[in-house]
């Protein structure tokens, strides 16, 4: 884990863009491990058995049976090592649907690592097992998400690492006002910019500035997927100051130009990449 982390690939969590919720299962005995990646969908992981090491941003998280991990939209992660008996469920929702499920007053998905109690874990596993790998389980997926999210937020006594209140508030403000920069966030929260930056970097494993750029990239991808094919117009709409800034962000985050990502088949190759140590597909 020494040195700078490898570049993460963009890989959609949902297997079909028409779906709004999905539950994957992963077994170390079956394999199919994804490389370091990120996606727009927030994700929850529930460890059914075994233990594992995750790379999350530029940090490392150790998990074992009964642990719950949450990855916000855009946070890169990777399963780096696992015991032979590792088995887990990964739960994800389309971002807009996730916001609807949590409600207008709901907190955004934040980095989370907690231990579920035995009864809590059993209830979650029963619900997840009933819909795992099944398409179009929107309502059931939403109900599972609500249950796991509630458990995670109320397991304070079993929290492995607590997300700082400034990180939670910054994520909520950026969700409502994406154009807010670091100084704007500091003004809203009435603290020094350096204080927000320090806690945000610790909690997400990436700088706030980089997270904002990645969020714009994800918003642009969403708009192009929805039919906006003029990349320059889309880049302006999501807040890039110029198309050259958008181009630089794509090169930095994905190692390619926007047109190459969307129109050359590279995105599809990224999506299908499994178990590779290479930075590019």
Image (tube, rainbow, N blue to C red):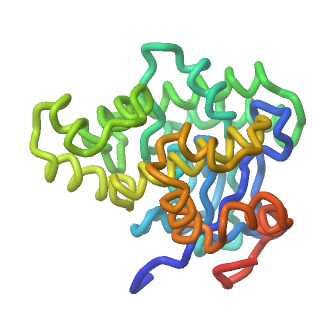
Where residue 133 sits: x, y (%)? Answer: 86, 43
- Is residue 154 something one can see in this rendering? no
Residue under the point 24% across and 38% down: 166
The C terminus lies in quadrant: bottom right
The N terminus lies in quadrant: bottom left
Who is closer to the viewer here, 156 or 195? Answer: 195
Determine the residue located farthest toward the top in the rendered image: 104
Who is closer to the viewer here, 126 or 70? Answer: 70
Who is closer to the viewer here, 223 or 279? Answer: 223
Can you say whether 82 is above or below 70 in the image?
A: below
Can you say whether 164 is above or below 177 in the image?
A: below
Where residue 75 sits: x, y (%)? Answer: 50, 54
Q: Quadrant of residue 207?
A: bottom left
Determine the residue located farthest toward the right in the rendered image: 135
Can you say whether 105 is above or below 274 in the image?
A: above
Where residue 51 sits: x, y (%)? Answer: 57, 64
Residue under the point 66% across and 68% down: 257
């Amino acid at each position: 884990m020494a040195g700078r982390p490898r570049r993460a690939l963009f890989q959609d969590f949902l297997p079909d863009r028409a779906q709004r919720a999905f539950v994957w299962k992963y077994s170390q005995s079956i394999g199919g491990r994804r490389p370091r990646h990120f996606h727009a969908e927030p994700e929850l992981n529930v460890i059914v058995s075994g233990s594992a090491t995750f790379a999350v941003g530029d940090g490392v998280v150790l998990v074992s049976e009964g642990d719950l991990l949450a990855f916000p939209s855009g946070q890169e992660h990777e399963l780096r090592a696992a015991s032979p008996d590792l088995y887990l469920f990964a739960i994800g929702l389309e971002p807009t649907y996730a916001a609807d499920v949590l409600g207008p007053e709901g907190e955004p998905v934040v980095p989370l690592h907690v231990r579920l109690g035995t009864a809590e874990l059993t209830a979650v596993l029963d619900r997840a097992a009933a819909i795992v790998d099944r398409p179009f389980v929107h309502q059931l997926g939403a109900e599972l998400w609500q249950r796991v999210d509630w458990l995670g937020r109320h397991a304070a006594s079993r929290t492995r690492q607590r997300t700082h209140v400034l990180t939670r508030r910054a994520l909520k403000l950026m969700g409502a006002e994406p154009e807010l920069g670091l100084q704007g966030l500091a003004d809203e929260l009435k603290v020094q910019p350096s204080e927000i930056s320090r806690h945000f970097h610790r909690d997400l494993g990436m700088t706030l500035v980089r997270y904002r750029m990645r969020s714009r990239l994800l918003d642009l991808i969403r708009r192009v997927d929805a039919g906006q094919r003029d990349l320059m117009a889309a880049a302006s709409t999501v807040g890039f100051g110029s198309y050259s800034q958008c181009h630089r962000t794509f090169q930095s985050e994905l190692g390619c130009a926007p047109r190459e990502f969307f129109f050359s088949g590279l995105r599809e190759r990224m999506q299908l990449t499994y178990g590779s140590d290479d930075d590019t597909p």
